[in-house]
């Protein structure tokens, strides 16, 4: 039996396991609230690993190692920015968001929370939020489809479109069947697979090279600048990398994990577990890239695609069956994010756009089926975009990340910590933030110079300024808003 046979066996075991988990979750999904938020039943361990796996995607095992493999440690500023941003998100957003979404209409999506929190009877906030989610998550899901197709093409020589289709079909299947619980439970398995793979592979690689000293010596022989934090980078580039951390406060697929916690008090344990997982995973991804430099670049064995360095090392250093499970970890990273994004996008279609226009109440089963139809629609559109294959995985993720961070981030922070935020201020800020991302990236960025700054920074700042200015101009006292704000604080502090 050849090597590829054993790798296919490993992959098949993983894919079947994900579908089985989906059907197990199906038994506990009876209405739309269960389908989208799992009945607010997540403990800190499940919530932390689910948030981490949903957040990191194929970027962690393909995009980040690929960037580090090409440019060295200067690309590590992205990981630092993300670690700081994730810690702040768990610390300052998670407990209060969990309490506030319970108090304000028992909201199950970010758009429905903003509409309820700001008493927006016009449904304008829900429509704007739903539109931002649809646009940027469709692009984000597309990046996952690209990663899936690239993965199967690089690993097995499979046709890109066949690989992309396989990832889409399995992910859509367990998301359709089991909803939020299926996504969360599979995320835990996928998160464990990712971190174990990112610990084992660099350790074996370093041993293969003869130890840490031999690895560093080999990297220095290629280019000593690869091991420095600043060489090869520019101030704008480093600031842009760190700015990735701003995105966390606006990520609906991460924030929804906070909303699903059993209680606000569990955010503390979730933060410790989540940041520990993330630190281990990003360190493993960094070491994987350096092992790749020491093995491939040192021996002048060029990789067809730098983002496939993890795949190449797995196939070189491990028995085909073990290599197959390492490869499955990449697939886990891709699928965990795609499934979460499909679900949140589906919720935007049903909970925020359909309900804004329809006066007909949804039955529990009707809501679930509309959610499933939404998952299918978004998956088809994302697959059509992925067929173009016109950007790197990191490039697609970066644009979508900026869209959410700048579109939602300031609004979420202000809604939780500033009583005087108004619906008009939030709506104006979100529109300005989202539009700035497009304009900065597509129109200004090609001009170079200061416009090479990552679009999340100027867009985030403009959203914040506009939201505050418009809110100050339109604020009127509202006893219901004041009461809910105080009640959320009490629940948060009571745990």
Image (cartoon, rainbow, N blue to C red):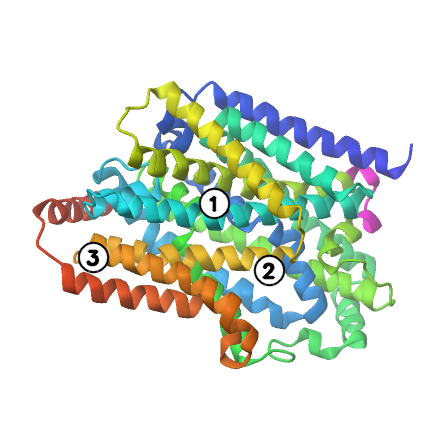
Real-space CA distance between mark 2 and mark 3, rounded to the nearest whole angstrom: 33 Å
Q: Is residue 87 above or below residue 494?
A: below
Nearest to viewer (mark 1 / mark 3) = 3
Real-space CA distance between mark 2 and mark 1, rounded to the nearest whole angstrom: 21 Å
Question: Which residue is under mark 3?
Answer: 421
Q: Is residue 484 left or right of residue 352?
A: left
Q: Which mark is residue 395?
A: 2
Q: Is residue 288 above or below residue 178?
A: below
Quadrant of the image for the N terminus? top right
Nearest to viewer (mark 2 / mark 1) = 2
Which is nearer the N-term, disc 2 or disc 3? 2
Q: Is residue 374 above or below residue 242?
A: above
Give the SS element for disc 2.
Answer: helix
Q: Nearer the viewer, residue 289 or 437?
A: 437
Q: Main secondary structure of the magenta part?
A: helix
Q: Name the residue: 83% across, 41% down.
A: 319
Question: Which residue is under mark 1?
Answer: 51
Q: Name the residue: 70% across, 49% down.
A: 200
Q: Give the image quarter of residue 233.
A: bottom right
Q: Name the residue: 43% across, 47% down.
A: 133
Residue 389, x across and y down, in percent: 67, 52
Which is nearer the N-term, disc 2 or disc 1? 1
Residue 455, x across and y down, in percent: 47, 67
Please give the range of residues in magenta. 315-322
């Amino acid at each position: 039996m050849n090597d590829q046979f054993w790798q296919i066996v490993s992959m098949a075991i993983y894919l079947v396991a994900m579908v089985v988990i989906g059907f197990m979750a199906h038994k506990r999904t009876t209405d739309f609230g269960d389908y989208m938020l799992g009945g607010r039943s997540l403990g800190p361990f499940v919530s932390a690993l689910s948030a981490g796996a949903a957040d990191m995607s194929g970027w962690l095992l393909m995009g980040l190692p690929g960037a580090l493999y090409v440019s060295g440690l200067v690309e590590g500023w992205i990981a630092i920015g993300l670690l700081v941003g994730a810690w702040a998100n768990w610390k300052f957003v998670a407990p209060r968001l969990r309490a506030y979404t319970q108090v304000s209409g028992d909201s199950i999506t970010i758009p429905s929370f903003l509409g309820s929190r700001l008493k927006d009877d016009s449904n304008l906030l829900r429509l704007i939020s739903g539109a931002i989610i649809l646009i940027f998550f469709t692009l984000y899901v597309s990046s996952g489809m690209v990663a899936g197709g690239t993965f199967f093409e690089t690993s097995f020589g499979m046709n890109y479109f066949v690989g992309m289709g396989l990832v889409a079909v399995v992910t859509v299947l367990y998301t359709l069947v089991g909803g939020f619980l299926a996504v969360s439970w599979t995320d835990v398995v996928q998160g464990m697979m990712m971190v174990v793979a990112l610990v084992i592979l660099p350790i074996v690689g370093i041993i293969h090279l003869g130890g840490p000293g031999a690895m560093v010596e080999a990297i220095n022989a290629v280019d000593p600048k690869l091991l420095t934090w600043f060489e090869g980078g520019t101030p704008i580039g480093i600031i842009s990398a760190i700015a990735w951390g701003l995105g966390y406060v606006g990520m609906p697929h991460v924030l929804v994990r906070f909303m699903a916690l059993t209680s606000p008090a569990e955010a503390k344990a979730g933060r410790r577990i989540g940041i520990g997982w993330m630190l281990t995973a990003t360190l493993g991804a960094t070491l994987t890239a350096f092992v790749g430099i020491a093995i491939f670049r040192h021996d002048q064995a060029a990789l067809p695609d730098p983002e496939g360095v993890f795949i190449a090392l797995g196939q070189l250093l491990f028995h085909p069956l073990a290599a197959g499970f390492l490869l499955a970890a990449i697939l886990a990273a891709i699928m965990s994010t795609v499934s979460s994004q499909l679900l949140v996008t589906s919720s935007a279609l049903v909970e925020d756009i359909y309900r804004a226009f329809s006066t007909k109440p949804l039955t529990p089963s009707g809501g679930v089926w509309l959610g499933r139809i939404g998952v299918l629609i978004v998956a088809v559109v994302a697959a059509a975009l992925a067929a173009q294959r016109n950007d790197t995985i990191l490039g697609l993720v970066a644009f979508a990340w900026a869209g959410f961070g700048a579109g939602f981030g300031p609004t979420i922070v202000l809604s939780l910590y500033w009583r005087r935020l108004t619906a008009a201020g939030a709506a104006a800020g979100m529109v300005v933030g989202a539009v700035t991302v497009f304009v900065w990236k597509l129109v200004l960025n090609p001009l170079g110079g200061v416009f090479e700054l990552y679009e999340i920074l100027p867009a985030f700042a403009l959203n914040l300024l506009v939201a505050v200015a418009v809110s100050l101009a339109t604020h009127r006292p509202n006893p219901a808003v004041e009461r809910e704000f105080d009640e959320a604080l009490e629940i948060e502090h009571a745990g």
